[in-house]
Image: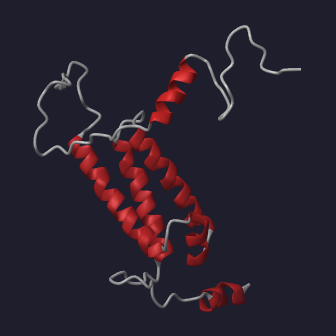
Amino acid sequence: MFLRAIGRPLLARVKQTTGIVGLDVVPNARAVLINLYTKTLKEIKEVPEDEGYRKAVETFTKHRLTVCEEEEEWEKIEERIGCGQVEELIEEAQDELKLIGKMIEWDPWGVPDDHECEIIENDAPIPKHVPRHIPGPLPAEFYQTLEAVLTKRVEPKGAPAVTSGESQSKA
């Protein structure tokens, strides 16, 4: 028992580098992630329960927290979460915490029911800063297929058209 408690941390593989310029190794990444995920779950409670943003953040954060609590080694955490290295996960979690604060400040779900949005009709001029996408013409085959589907007339390629009253198979 004593050897397990003392020996396991000594035998754990130590990460030398992340291999990503500017991203240093975090020796206690598991503890940092658990702390960040716990803070995230606490702060996201300020967002209304029925909002999709809150549901998404709670779902993936709970999953990642569970993985971090179940696994001791950074390699297993990275493998099970499957979204990069633990150091990258730390950066993501820190960014998510910042975003939660901004989302609470911006209050995008607090739009009143009587709020009116400006509706731009098709004939309204498009501002110059808005990119325009004008699709090119479709091939003639598309229109032939569309017409056949709309008239419920589907023929195999190369087969002569069957007119009403004619049998398709000649015996």
Look at the image and tell me in which quarter the C terminus lies: top right
Q: Nearer the viewer, residue 80 or 162?
A: 162
- Against 2, residue 88 (above or below) is above
User: Extreme right residue here?
Assistant: 171
**Can residue 73 be seen by looking at this rendering?**
no
Across and down, in percent, residue 5 comes to 66, 84
Q: Quadrant of residue 94?
A: bottom left
For the residue pair 92 and 120, the one nearer the viewer reads as 120
In the orientation shown, which residue stands out farthest toward the top? Answer: 165
Q: Is residue 119 left or right of residue 26?
A: left
* Residue 48 location (% of width, % of height): 36, 36
Residue 64 image position (x, y, % from top left): 53, 60
**In this view of the protein, which residue sits in the foreground, 66 or 160?**
160
Identify the residue shown where x is 51% and y is 87%: 15
Percent coordinates x, y for residue 79 in the rendering = 60, 70
Figure quadrant of the N terminus:
bottom right
